[in-house]
Amino acid sequence: MQLWHHPLVFRDLVIFVAQLQRTLLDIHALLGYAEILYPLLVTPPSKPMRANLTWMGCFTKRTEICESLYFAGVPVWLVRHESLIPSTMNIVRPVQLTFPEDIVRAMYLEDGVAKPFRAIHRGPADLLRHYHTRRPYEGTLAEQPEPVATSSAAHLSSQQHSHGRKQVTEKRSKDARVKATAGPSKDL
């Protein structure tokens, strides 16, 4: 019997098989979480586990989630401005979140107020470009904690204070918060 003469239409059969595969992958991931990851999250080890490179990993803005996943061996990326990261945290490689160069983000003035044009992409099509034109990166939407004071910032602040100038640490921390929530920038 040929597949074309089956009571199900061929495309329905393909969709059914794809849904079955997706369901089996979901079950496999859930069992892996229950057997491997959940025990490590409930009773974290004293030393970080070696990262499991077969896992996709995750992105987070919260340091406590980042730390617990890191100790469990999950590849994890902390999305924060560097001034908001504690000095005790182990950073493997910092990256900067920026728009791809070929997405045009121009502004125009209307009654003295700057308003953005719709995002336009000029170049080869791919999913990343499509995503950035539909949902532009807008910085963070959550409340940001106070920046962690670094030794260089404290040293600079003490030098300015000793020269009779007003301390500007509060202004500097506000500027760091504004930069962190302002969106992508090459100089972050």
Image (spheres, rainbow, N blue to C red):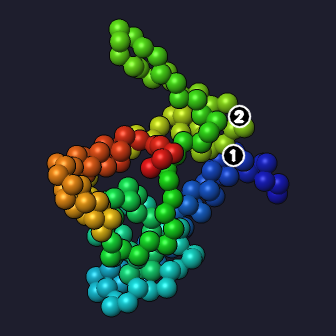
* Mark before the other along the chain sequence, 2 or 1: 1
In percent of the image, x 22 and y 62: which residue is there?
A: 158
- Please, what is the three-letter code of the amino acid marked with disc 2? Gly
Query: Relative to 46, does residue 135 appear above or below in the rendering?
Result: above
User: Residue tagged by mark 2?
Assistant: 123
- Residue 150 makes an appearance in the image: no
Indicate which disc residue 11 carries: 1
Q: Are marks 2 and 1 in contact (CB under 8 Å)?
A: no
Q: Nearer the viewer, mark 2 or mark 1?
A: 2
Which secondary structure lies at badge 1? helix
Which secondary structure lies at badge 2? loop
95 left or right of 70 in image? right
Question: What's the CA distance linking mark 2 and mark 1?
Answer: 33 Å
Q: What x and y, as percent, mark residue 127?
A: 62, 44
In percent of the image, x 41 and y 20: which residue is there?
A: 115
In percent of the image, x 79 and y 48: which residue is there?
A: 4
- Please, what is the three-letter code of the amino acid marked with disc 1? Arg
Residue at the bottom extreme, as displayed: 46
In percent of the image, x 17 and y 48: which residue is there?
A: 166
Residue at the right extreme, as displayed: 2
Count numbered badges in the picture: 2
Query: Relative to 47, does residue 8 appear above or below in the rendering?
Result: above
Query: Camera-side residue: 112 or 4?
Result: 112
Query: Relative to 135, does residue 45 appear above or below in the rendering?
Result: below
